[in-house]
Amino acid sequence: MIVNPRLAVLYVGDQGRTLEFLTGTLGFELAADVPLGDGRRWVEVRPPGAQTCVALAAVEPEILEALHARAGRMTHGWFDCDDLDATCQDLHARGVEIVVAPQATPWRENGRWAQIRGHDGNLYGLTERGG
């Protein structure tokens, strides 16, 4: 029986810059950073206490831009928050750009969401847990 998503993949143009944003700014934990040779590495991070990790998959800038053009920048990462307003206030105080302020979700009854911009140019969705 499947019990939990183990891993989500985030395609990034610069693993180091995204790693710094997720660990240094958002407070994620480094779960794995393994050299693969030829300057490549396998990197996983996760929010503290989370079971699911996010793998940072490095791709060439033109592939990342093509992915953004076809699928949009929001398709990469969505993260739950216990208190969306407090999280956005904290992130704003740390210099994170809040692209969409906390508001009701049009796709989920009683849900709330916000959007932030990462150092890597990706946009990340934040949702309030339980909504």
Image (cartoon, grey):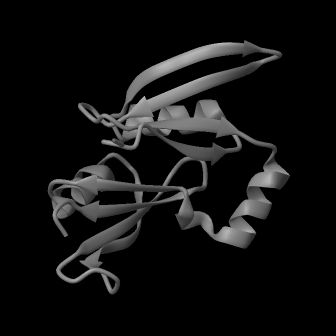
State which quarter of the image contains the N terminus. Answer: top left
Please indicate whether residue 6 sits to the left or right of residue 55 in the image: left
Q: Tell me where residue 56 appears, x and y as whole percent.
A: 58, 36
Q: How many marks?
A: 0
Up-down relation of residue 61 to residue 58 (above or below): below
State which quarter of the image contains the C terminus. Answer: bottom left
Please indicate whether residue 110 sits to the left or right of residue 65 in the image: left
Residue drawn at (80%, 49%), measured in percent from left and top? 61
Residue drawn at (83%, 16%), measured in percent from left and top? 38
Up-down relation of residue 44 to residue 130 (above or below): above
Up-down relation of residue 117 to residue 35 (above or below): below
Q: Tell me where residue 27 appears, x and y as whole percent.
A: 33, 35
Q: Tell me where residue 106 appears, x and y as whole percent.
A: 33, 86
Up-down relation of residue 53 to residue 85 (above or below): above
Residue drawn at (36%, 41%), measured in percent from left and top? 26
Image quadrant where residue 37 sits:
top right
12 and 93: which one is in front? 12
Image quadrant where residue 83 sits:
bottom left
Q: Tell me where residue 94 appears, x and y as whole percent.
A: 33, 46
Please indicate whether residue 33 sits to the left or right of residue 62 in the image: left
Residue drawn at (28%, 36%), measured in percent from left and top? 50
- The outermost residue toward the front is 1
Please indicate whether residue 88 sits to the left or right of residue 130 in the image: right
